[in-house]
Amino acid sequence: MPTPPAQPTGELRREQLLNAADRVVQREGPGASMNAIAAEAGITKPILYRHFGDRNGLIGALTERHTSGLLAAVRAALNEPLERRDRVEHVLDTYLAAIESRPQVYRLLTHPEGGDPTGAGNALAPALRQIAEEITKAVQTQVDLGADGPLLSETWGRAVTGMVLAAGDWWLEQRPCPRARMVQALADLLWGRLAAAGDLPGAVAAAPQAAPQAD
Amino acid sequence: MPTPPAQPTGELRREQLLNAADRVVQREGPGASMNAIAAEAGITKPILYRHFGDRNGLIGALTERHTSGLLAAVRAALNEPLERRDRVEHVLDTYLAAIESRPQVYRLLTHPEGGDPTGAGNALAPALRQIAEEITKAVQTQVDLGADGPLLSETWGRAVTGMVLAAGDWWLEQRPCPRARMVQALADLLWGRLAAAGDLPGAVAAAPQAAPQAD
DNA sequence: AGGGCGTGTTACCTCGGGTAACATCAAGGG
DNA sequence: CCCTTGATGTTACCCGAGGTAACACGCCCT
């Protein structure tokens, strides 16, 4: 008797399978095998393939689950009625808080991997792409950039997303400081603190006569 | 007679194999199989494994080849005797020019993929990690950031690397503008143009009395 | 009763990374 | 002169993971 308890059906079953997949990914990371996920769900592979088509389908469905929450949170933060600096900090904090709470899920969102090797297309994962688009849209509708607006907002959307991705990744691994400080560091960068800071004595410059030392 | 022409030996042979691997990766992208690489070299798999241990070893050796050039170029740009803005632009242009000239190699550098699923460690590929460290070092030795210097320079090294990675990736795919314009857009972001720009009329703000509309 | 439909199974295929065992040639020392 | 050493190369195989038949059970609805 392979089915002692009557398993739910249809959409419900699908949710259960996603729950199982979620647990495995939380435990083993994005590299979790279909066999492992099936075992966690108490079933075998073909059922997973019936529900999700292929691995990308499963990972995609799993990704969208978490993406929707993160994306909604970021979108909300982008439209918070705050001064611009506070709003930016709020967005940064929202993202960092999200990845802090579920690192394994975060890895899944940012490094889906299984993309077809033929395409070799987009580097930013879909989840990040959506965030980049949200930032682009927010910049376009909120900031006056003159004639360069469209190009700058598109570029900056990707740039800021990549910046926060890389910095957040490093922060998650090293935990060099509390979250609030990280938010400040990134906001400071966007506020031109790197550009405004003074030179250090020994630094290179447009130096006409400085004496460089070897190696 | 399996060896009609006397094949070179030792380090020379290794270089030949790397050349073959390079050609395949240029042609098929980072997902190239060991069989394909062996075939391109006119041999079979075990020889590759003798020379490089495993796939990571091969990809690593191949990566380091190209990394050394890119890294040296970026390092040189970081130490160019220019005003800070010009120096930053020079670094950005150096990176974009490099990835523009060899897209497939660039993909290899940025998306090595094959990392062991158990570790699930660093997101930035080694090549990018090294660039991040160079930026960190440059900031530390050139810019006066006060007591926060160490943390900020480390954070910013990663952040800027990720920013340029994401923006550069998008630029490579879409080619929305010439390289010089892209350099300007990114430098402007780092120079706080996003922070300094004015608000657009309809934008959200610290608005005390705005009437939000439902969804 | 008899279709569908959704559930589940076992068994298999393919492909890619990785390895073992064996064959060959060139060089160098007793 | 022979025989060891170290490089080249081979065929044949193992294993794990994605993916796919083909088949079997249970339920609901006509």
Image: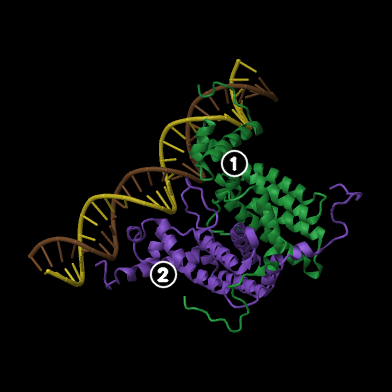
Chain colours: A purple, B green, C brown, D yellow
Horizontal and vertical percent position of residue B39: 50, 33
Depth order, front residue of C29/B198: B198
Depth order, front residue of A79/B116: A79
Left or right: residue A169 versus residue B68 is left
Amino acid type of disc 1? Phe
Disc 1, SS: helix
State the residue at coordinates (60%, 35%).
B19
- Alpha-carbon distance for marks 2 and 1? 40 Å
Q: Which residue has dot 2 on it?
A: A19
Amino acid type of disc 2? Asn
Horizontal and vertical percent position of residue B199: 64, 71
Q: Which residue has dot 1 on it?
A: B52
Depth order, front residue of A175/B213: B213
Depth order, front residue of A108/A184: A184
State the residue at coordinates (49%, 63%).
A28
Q: Is residue B57 visible?
A: no
